[in-house]
Image (cartoon, grey):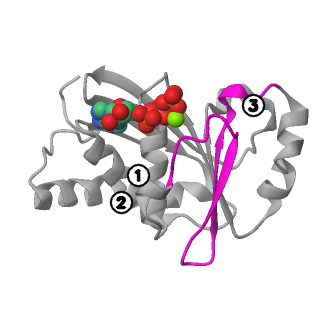
């Protein structure tokens, strides 16, 4: 299943990610790919919000590879920035295999392409691209059992944006580019 939305502000990106975050369960891995400054950390803030955390608690982990946040729902959000990871040793140092095996951990990875060989098959993929100064194209893909996490998100986000008075033209079904 694939969803494509246009997010015309940081707030819209956070809103979309929050809707996804509310649907996540322990064991889920979310990989967020896209160029520098496209909003990957911003997306993780939204996921955190959806998991019941303060979005501001999430900071860019660039210099420390990985940060953990305990959520009120008893899950742990582990935020990994693979930008500076140099190989299997680095992954071992953060206990990567244990993280993937943990049933009460949600793992969000920025720059997943840097560790593509270590990624599990079962994952949600988020692709972000600049489409303007404050506009991003966000594509979310999930297959197999994980596809159910995405069901109805498009409609839900449209309803929320309408309520908030935000633009609703970002729907994947819209005809604009
Ligand atoms: N629609 C948008 N969605 C997300 N961020 C946006 C948007 N419009 C503008 N921004 C801005 O873009 C920047 C995104 O920063 P962020 O740290 O989230 O990017 P990143 O992809 O994690 O960067 P890095 O590659 O360094 O990890 C922020 O300053 C944010 O305010
Ligand atoms: Mg970042």
Q: Quadrant of ligand 1?
A: top left
Is label 2 in a helix, a strand or a loop? loop
Q: CA distance from mark 1 to mark 2?
A: 14 Å
Q: Is residue 23 above or below residue 17?
A: below
Image location of residue 12, percent across then percent down = 27, 46
Q: Which numbered marker is on residue 17?
A: 1
Task: Find residue 152 and report its image quarter.
Answer: bottom left
Residue 29 can be seen, yes or no = yes
Image location of residue 157, percent across then percent down = 27, 55
Task: Find residue 72 and report its image quarter.
Answer: bottom right
Q: CA distance from mark 2 to mark 3?
A: 30 Å
Residue drawn at point x = 48 percent, y = 57 percent? 57
- The residue lying furthest to the front in this view is 63
Q: Is residue 151 magenta?
A: no
Q: Is mark 2 within 8 Å of ligand 1?
A: no
Q: Residues within 10 Å of mark 3 (few under 14, many from 20)?
A: some
Please report the bounds of the magenta region as a residue range: 58-86
The residue singled out by tag 2 in the image is: 152
Question: Disc 1 vs disc 2: Cβ atoms closer than 8 Å?
Answer: no
Q: Say which of marks 1 and 2 sits in front.
A: 1
Residue drawn at point x = 27 percent, y = 47 percent? 11
Is label 1 in a helix, a strand or a loop? helix
Is label 3 in a helix, a strand or a loop? helix
Q: CA distance from mark 3 to mark 1?
A: 22 Å
The residue singled out by tag 3 in the image is: 115
Question: Disc 2 vs disc 3: Cβ atoms closer than 8 Å?
Answer: no
Left or right: where does residue 151 sit relative to residue 120? Answer: left
Q: Earlier in the sequence, mark 2 or mark 3?
A: 3
Left or right: where does residue 25 sit relative to residue 37? Answer: right
Image location of residue 139, percent across then percent down = 42, 36
Which of the two residues, 169 or 37, is positioned nearer the viewer here? Answer: 37
Residue drawn at point x = 38 percent, y = 60 percent? 19
């Amino acid at each position: 299943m694939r969803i494509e939305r246009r997010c015309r502000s940081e707030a819209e990106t956070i809103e979309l990610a929050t809707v996804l975050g509310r649907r996540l369960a322990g064991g889920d891995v979310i990989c967020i790919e896209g160029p520098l400054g496209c909003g990957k950390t911003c997306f993780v803030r939204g996921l955190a919000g959806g998991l019941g955390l303060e979005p501001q608690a999430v900071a860019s982990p660039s210099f420390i590879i990985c940060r953990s946040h305990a959520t009120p729902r008893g899950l742990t959000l582990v935020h990994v920035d693979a930008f500076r990871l140099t190989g299997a040793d680095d992954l071992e140092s953060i206990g990567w295999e244990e993280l993937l095996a943990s049933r009460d951990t949600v793992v969000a990875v920025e720059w997943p392409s840097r560790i593509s060989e270590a990624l599990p098959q079962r994952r949600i993929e988020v692709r972000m691209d600049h489409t303007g100064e404050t506009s991003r194209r966000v594509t979310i893909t999930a297959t197999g059992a994980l596809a159910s996490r995405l069901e109805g998100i498009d409609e839900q986000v449209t309803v929320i944006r309408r309520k908030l008075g935000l633009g609703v033209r970002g729907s994947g079904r819209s005809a604009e580019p």
